[in-house]
Image: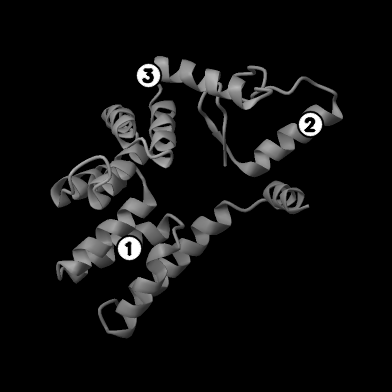
Amino acid sequence: STLMSCCCKLICNGCHYANVMRESDGKLQHSCPFCRHPRAKSQKEADLDMMKRVEANDPIAICQMGERCSDEGDYESAFEYLIKAAGLGDAGAHYRLSAMYYEGKGVQKDKKKEVSHLEEAAIGGHSRARHNLGVIEKENGRNDRAVKHWIIAANMGYDGPLENLKLEYREGLVSKEDYASALRGHQTAVDATKSSQRDEAEAARIK
């Protein structure tokens, strides 16, 4: 997916590619398909657009700034941005905070806070957070709860729990019906993301 810096909305790669081709074929101005703001012509312009969204308390923009600071090693600023974005309900921010508490980057390692942020992220629809909760439950010997988390994550199209569920099935800890249902749910979610436009976008990227 592509994040539009002007309004911080996500557009799938297929739709983004189709929009770019439509503008090029029609000799139209390149603009955001959501807010119609002229597309940034440089990284500097994109950064300015992003900061405007941060100042407007856009949780996605604030989370993006937190992730950027984290990637640059500025964990103090990253934490400030992410905790604010999390307070505004951003699931991705909760997930990044869980990672910080797990790794001890910018904060003291804290298992309780790690799990708390994972739970908030999972509630917000973050599939990797849901998977990680399953891993923690497995480590604590709560297999039934681990499997439930993994099935939910699989049904969201996340690949991570598939191997775990296969092992649980082989050990007799997951029924044949539940395992088959999880595989079907995963495939349905993956198929829902496929389109000819996305295939064209991927082919153009490879070229």
> Where is residue 80 drawn, in percent x and y?
29, 28
Q: Mark 3 to mark 2: distance in Å?
A: 32 Å
Write down the residue under mark 2. 22
Q: Name which residue lies at 66% across and 38% down.
A: 15
Of label 1 and label 3, which has the lower sequence position? 3
Element at label 3: loop
Going by the picture, which residue comes out furthest to the front?
Answer: 73
The tag on residue 150 is: 1
Q: Amino acid at mark 1?
A: Trp
Q: Is residue 41 left or right of residue 101?
A: right
Q: Note whether 127 is above or below 29 in the view shown.
A: below
Q: Is residue 157 left or right of residue 79?
A: right
Of label 3 and label 2, which has the lower sequence position? 2
> CB atoms at circles 1 and 2 under 8 Å apart?
no
> Where is residue 126 drawn, in percent x and y?
36, 47
Q: Quadrant of the N terminus?
A: top right
The tag on residue 120 is: none
Front disc: 1 or 3: 3
Of label 1 and label 2, which has the lower sequence position? 2
Write down the residue under mark 3. 57
Q: Mark 1 to mark 2: distance in Å?
A: 40 Å
Element at label 2: helix
